[in-house]
Image (cartoon, grey):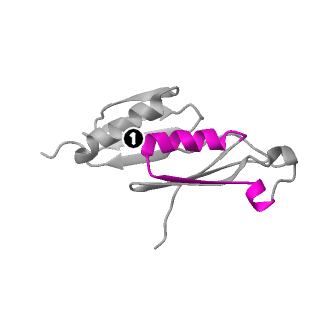
Amino acid sequence: MVTLNPYLNFRDNAREAMEFYHSVFGGDLNVSTFADYQSAQDPSENDLVMHAQLDGPGLTLMGADTPKHMDYNGISGFSVSLSGPNEDDATLRGYWDKLADGGTIVQPLEVAPWGDAFGMLVDRFGVSWLINIGGAAA
């Protein structure tokens, strides 16, 4: 089965970010460092994250640190979207509240013209999130 999932790149704080997402979504977090694979070109980067994967209910989120010898342009130009039916309202609002902690709300999570609850925020790590909660059944 083919799976499409976000892969987030950070500069020196992937572990902190992925542990934060683990606290938001739960699930299982696996982290490998550059030292684990003898892949650091600079010994000061041994403990940086070469690959992290969070597998939670209905989601897979991956991330890594970008080594200093590689260009890093920050996190921009995309959003990670979380959506679900009205029955998942409490779960999605819980994610919203946790992701918003220390972040910036761009569009409050409220009923949109199309009838769903929708909101946008940028979390404390600079990742843009969209949350869409299906409207109540008519």
Residue 116, can we see it? no
Percent position of residue 89, x then y: 27, 41
Residue 11, above or below 84: above
Amino acid carrying mark 1 in the image: Ile
Q: Residue furthest left?
A: 138
- Residue 135 position within the rendered picture, expressed as x and y whole percent measured from the top left: 23, 42
Report which residue position mark 1 lands on: 131
The answer to whether residue 66 shows anywhere in this view is yes
Question: In the image, residue 114 lies at what x, y percent?
Answer: 27, 40
Residue 47 covered by magenta stretch: no
Element marked by disc 1:
strand
54 horizontally vs 65: left or right: left
How many numbered discs?
1
Q: Which residues are magenta?
A: 11-38
Task: Say if the magenta span includes residue 30.
Answer: yes
Residue farthest right in this picture? 42
Tell which residue pokes out farthest to the front in this image. Answer: 36
Q: Where, quadrant-wise, is the C terminus in this rendering?
A: top left
Residue 134, horizontal then vertical, whole percent: 27, 45
Position of 41 compared to 131: left or right?
right
The quadrant holding residue 91 is top left
The quadrant holding residue 50 is: bottom right
Mark 1, other Cα within 10 Å: few <14 / some 14–19 / many ≥20: many
Which residue is drawn at the image coordinates 56% and 45% (left, top)? 78
Residue 11 lies left or right of residue 53; in this view the side is right
Vertical order, 101 against 56 (above or below)? above
Q: Residue furthest bottom?
A: 1
| Residue located 87% across and 48% down the image | 42
Q: Residue at x 40, y 31 (%)?
A: 97
Q: Residue at x 46, y 27 (%)?
A: 105
